[in-house]
Amino acid sequence: MNEAPKMTFNAPAALRALMNAPGAFIRPAVCDPMMARIAQKAGFKCLGIGGFAMGAHTCVTEPMFGMSELADESRKIQAAVTVPTIVDIGCGFGEAIQVWRTIREMERAGLGGVQMEDQVFPKRAHYHRDYVEHVIDMDHMLEKISVAVEAKTDPNFVLMARTDAMRTDGFAEGVKRANAYARAGADLIMLFPNSLEETIRAPKEIDAPLVYVVSHGNRVGRPVPSPAELADMGYKVISIAILSTLVTYRALTDAFTRLHDTGEVAMSQQEAIDARQAVEDLIGLPELYRIEERTTEKKKA
C-alpha cells in the first residue's frame, strides 16, 4: 500500500488561518533556529524576526544588515519550525523595485509574511537612540505598499505595514496613515502610540487588524501593557520585540561572568545533563539516531 504523501507546511496559509481565528495572539521575536524551536515548543503559534533583535545577535545592527543576509537567516529560522514567521524588512531595502525583489525573496524563503515601515532608507542608527524617527511622506509609503502587494505570488503572504508617525507627527497622523495603508492592501497595521490613552483609542479609530509592539526596555515611556490588556483593547497581534535579546544577554553575561570569576557554572551536573538532553531532543538528534541505527550504525551479522 502506498503511503499518503506528507503535507508540506505552508507558512502564509497558516498565518492567514491564525489571523482569521477569533482573539489575539502573541508574536515573540526570535533570532536563530534554536530560539525559534524553543518558542514553538513553548506553545507560540506565530514568530517574528525583528530588525533590532537580528541586528543585535549578529553584532551588525539593523541599519547595516543587507537584504540577502536577512533572507538567508530568515530561511533557516522558518525551516526549523512549523509555525509561521513574519520578518521585519525595515524600509523594504529601497524604493519600488527594491521592495519588489525583497517581497519575492522573502516569499522564496518560505516565510509567512513581512513587516515594512514608513521610515527613510538607508535606515539610520539614530532610530535606536531613543527612537529618533525619520518618517517618509505618506504617498511615498503608499507607493511602496502597492508594489509590495503587486509583488506577492502567494495571495496568503501577509503584508504588515508599520507607521512611526504617531511619535513624529501626532496621533491623528498615525491614524490617518494606518487607515490609508490598510486601504492600499496592508493586511496588518503596526503602530506606536505615545501613551496609554492613545493605545486604548487606536483600535477604535483604525479599520484594520492592529499590531502592538510591547517594547520592553524602551526609554521613551512607551506603555508596556500585558498581552491580556492589549487583547481586551482590540489588538490582534501582540509583538514581543526584544525580550529574547534581553534575556539572552542577561543569562549569558551572568553565566560567563560567574565562570570567569569563580570557575563555576550556574547549574549542577544533573541539571547540565538534563539541559543537554533537552537540546538534543530539540534539534532532532533522536530521529537521526534512529536513521543511523538502521543504516550506518546497523550491527553486521
Image (spheres, rainbow, N blue to C red):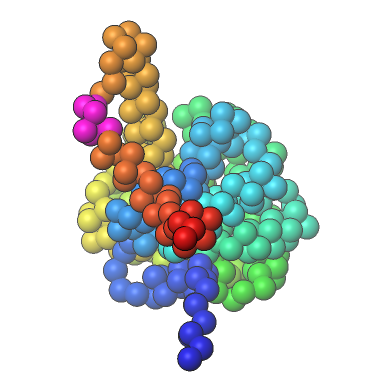
- The residue located at (29%, 49%) in the rendering is 197
Residues shaded magenta: 267-272
Viewer-proximal residue among 247 and 274? 274
Residue 253 in picture, x, y percent from top left: 37, 21
Can the viewer see residue 64 in this picture? yes
Tell which of 4 and 98 is nearer to you.
4
Quadrant of residue 21 within the rendered picture: bottom left
Q: Assign the magenta stretch its main secondary structure.
A: helix
50 shown above or below 102: above
The location of residue 10, given as percent across then percent down, is 52, 71
Residue name at image x 30 percent, y 74 percent = 22
Q: Is residue 268 magenta?
A: yes
| Residue 174 at least partly seen | no
Residue 296 position in % (x across, y down): 53, 55
Q: Residue at x 58, y 63 (%)?
A: 110
Left-right relation of 278 to 164: left
- Give the number of marks: 0
The residue sitting at the bottom extreme is 1
Q: Which residue is farthest right?
A: 97
- Above or below for 130 versus 265: below
Q: Quadrant of residue 147?
A: bottom right
Residue 284 magenta-highlighted: no
In the image, is 245 to the left or to the right of 95? left
Which residue is found at the position 26% from the left and 46% from the top? 225
Which one is in front, 222 or 20?
20
Residue at the front extreme of this rendering: 301
Near-viewer residue (286 or 65)? 286
